[in-house]
Amino acid sequence: MAERTQPLHDAPIPGMSLTHELGARPWQSPPQYATVDEAIEYYMSRMSSDEFVDQLVDVMEMGIPLTTLANTIQMSGVMDGKHTIDVGILIMPVLIEMMMLIGDTQKVDYDSGLENPDKGKTRSSTLAKVKAELKKKMQSNNMPSEPEEEPELMMEETEMKEPKGLMARR
């Protein structure tokens, strides 16, 4: 591999992101839709288009949870200055319900993201397996399954060594 001998002069300088005027970014301006009702109306009109439905069905078939999609949609609305973050959080359940309705009408199996997929399952990690085997062996040997607390070992003062080194107390 060849090393660069010349420094990069087109890289951003430190603090460059702080040089824009206040209000120049979409999220620094007042939102386009200030209420929850206005934001829901905006998203419902966008989600009812055939183009959105086709793209949503494709994404649903990939197995991406609807909660993730709703969060992405509302966050992009915040970054575009469509609504504030609190309005986005409040409309997320409506977005999920609308996507579930679209999935049901299109007869697509989807992951809503609302269920806990690990509910009722045991951990399948190596550590859990080893722990279960050890517990069985201890029960077969009539040993208690939980180890008893060991008494603290006390060192006699004669056994303690004097600290040495640069940072040792004198």
Image (tube, rainbow, N blue to C red):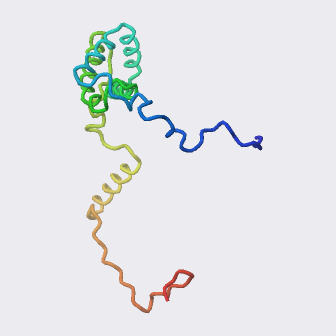
Question: Looking at this rendering, what residue extends furthest in the bottom direction?
Answer: 158
Rendering quarter of residue 69: top left
Residue situated in front as seen by the camera: 60 or 150: 60
The structure residue drawn at horizontal position 30% and vertical position 62%, both measured from the top left corner, is 141
| Above or below 25: residue 95 | above
| Above or below 139: residue 108 | above
Expressed as whole percent of the image width and height from the top left, the position of residue 32 reads 32, 22
Question: Looking at this rendering, what residue extends furthest in the top direction?
Answer: 50
| Above or below 40: residue 134 | below
| Above or below 54: residue 116 | below
Please give left or right for residue 17 compared with residue 144 in the image.
Answer: right
Residue situated in front as seen by the camera: 27 or 162: 27
Expressed as whole percent of the image width and height from the top left, the position of residue 20 reads 49, 35
The quadrant the N terminus occupies is: top right
The structure residue drawn at horizontal position 32% and vertical position 17%, both measured from the top left corner, is 109
Question: Looking at this rendering, what residue extends furthest in the front direction?
Answer: 21
Rendering quarter of residue 145: bottom left
Residue situated in front as seen by the camera: 44 or 17: 17
Rendering quarter of residue 154: bottom left
Expressed as whole percent of the image width and height from the top left, the position of residue 34 reads 27, 25
Expressed as whole percent of the image width and height from the top left, the position of residue 28 reads 38, 32
> Number of callouts in the render?
0
The structure residue drawn at horizontal position 77% and vertical position 44%, both measured from the top left corner, is 5
